[in-house]
Image: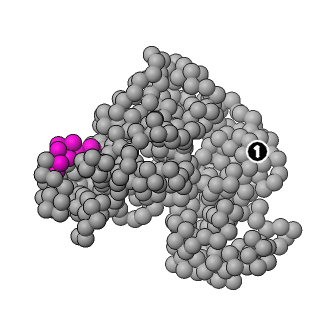
Amino acid sequence: MDKDCSMYIEHVESGKRKVTLSLTVNDRLVVRDVDPQMTLLHFLRDELKLFGTKEACGEGECGACTVIMNGKAVTSCIILAIEAEGAQITTVEGLAKDGKLSILQEEFVSQDALQCGFCTPGFLMSTRALLDSNADPSDEEIIETLSGNLCRCTGYIPILNAVKRTIERERKELGR
Amino acid sequence: MISRFQYFKPHNLSDAVQYLEKEDNSYVLAGGTDLMILLRRNLINAEHIVDIKAIPELSALEYSNSTGLTIGAGVVVNRLVDSEIVKTNYPALQQAAASLASFQLRNRATAVGNICNASPGADLPPSLLVYDALVNITGPHGDRQVPVDQFFTGVKRTVLQRGELVVSLQLPEPGEGDRSIYLRQTRLRGHDLATVGVASRIKPNGKVAIGICAVAPTPLRLFALEDKINERGLNKETIDWAGEEINAHIRPISDVRSSALYRLQMASVLLKRGLLNLIGEEE
């Protein structure tokens, strides 16, 4: 296969001895034996069947695989699963509670901040990490924080609007 | 990924060094933002990965008046961006850190990794060069300290020997009235290396220091140009002259990011813009 091919390539077992990994994913403790070669992205998708986190470039450039690791937005495609030992991970599946979308997700819908939706989980997680550390960021701070997420559909303005509406609503409804 | 590696996460420096010396094809993993891509593209065949993130002293980011700034090998770039101490005392370094890659990558990428990877276009070296940064190295034969202008030996090559590991970067205290700026030309902010990056500094004694990336096989400190500028005295006229003269001190190539000619022109523009900014003059 072409080495630059960017389609999702499933993890291939290396045959090396597995390593026990224990971490918290979306508030749930997970303990698994993993291949040392496995990326965090593959672990989330292939092992935990959390398919919300996407792979596009596979090299940390596009942000589609962004998850929150210990409070920081990171690209899970270039992190080894075993580097996440003991970590707290939040994926897009961790945003909705009791079957109800979060305010952030609702505003991405209301502002048409997505079309094909492939980049959306990454944008949501980058935004969540930002708002968790800074409840009232400036436009410049929002744009800078989301500069590592690429979207080919929206032209970004609806995404910026969704983030700003989220800030407003979270302030009013959650008292942030 | 063709590499089949063992993963080792030492908790102290001596275990890390012993392992790196003993095992062939072993690679240091800090942020992984370069290493993981080399692995994924099958450009290296790693048999051992040594993750240094559990070694306590490597996470230090400290400043004192006597020793200046210490940046441990585990310090991620966003810590430099967010540090008030770095922003106040080493503005060019803070600006370079803020311009490096994207937000998510800066949450993983380390400053020390940026120099160890030794890309000619890496963003941090120009600023580290103008601040006379020292690279603290440990290895099987003890510790040594290398000035950052002697650290790079070629494209993706450094002075590091088998078993050696960079522990930290050390930047001397800049002193009262020190000024600096990092300017960068790039095709696409957040997603590309610098086409040219220039760090300019005026020291408290009025002498200039200039560091530049992406115009030679290694990042460069332009000592000869600095001497000429300092001889002439720093003013608008000298800066105009230096904008022409810089092209005699760099050797850019044409590549996917830029032609050599464009790099020459941008080096001139960024140097003049930076120095004028530092002396408070309009372009």
Say how the picture is coloured: one colour
Residue B157 is one of the magenta-drawn residues: no
Which quadrant would the N terminus of chain B be assigned to in this image?
Answer: top right
Q: Where is residue B214 in the image (x, y as percent from the top left)?
A: 30, 51
- The residue depicted at 69 percent of the width and 48 percent of the height is A43
Secondary structure of the residue carrying numbered label 1: strand
Q: How crowded is mark 1: few (under 14 residues within 10 Å), some or many (20 or more)?
A: some
Tell me the chief SS of the magenta region. helix
Q: Which chain carries label 1?
A: A
Would residue B39 be seen by someone viewing this image from the given angle?
no
- The residue depicted at 50 percent of the width and 39 percent of the height is B64
- The residue depicted at 77 percent of the width and 61 percent of the height is A94
Is residue A115 rendered to the left or right of residue B251? Answer: right
Is residue B157 rendered to the left or right of residue B266? Answer: right
Residue B224 is one of the magenta-drawn residues: yes
Near-viewer residue (B222 or B219): B222
Give the magenta part as a residue range.
B220-230
Near-viewer residue (B130 or B31): B130
Residue corresponding to mark 1: A23
Q: Position of residue B36 (x, y in %)?
A: 52, 44
Q: Which amino acid does label 1 sit on?
A: Leu
Would residue B232 be seen by someone viewing this image from the given angle?
yes
Q: Quadrant of residue B173?
A: top left
Q: Position of residue B46 (x, y in %)?
A: 51, 32
Q: In which quarter of the image is residue B254?
A: bottom left
Q: Position of residue A2 (x, y in %)?
A: 46, 51
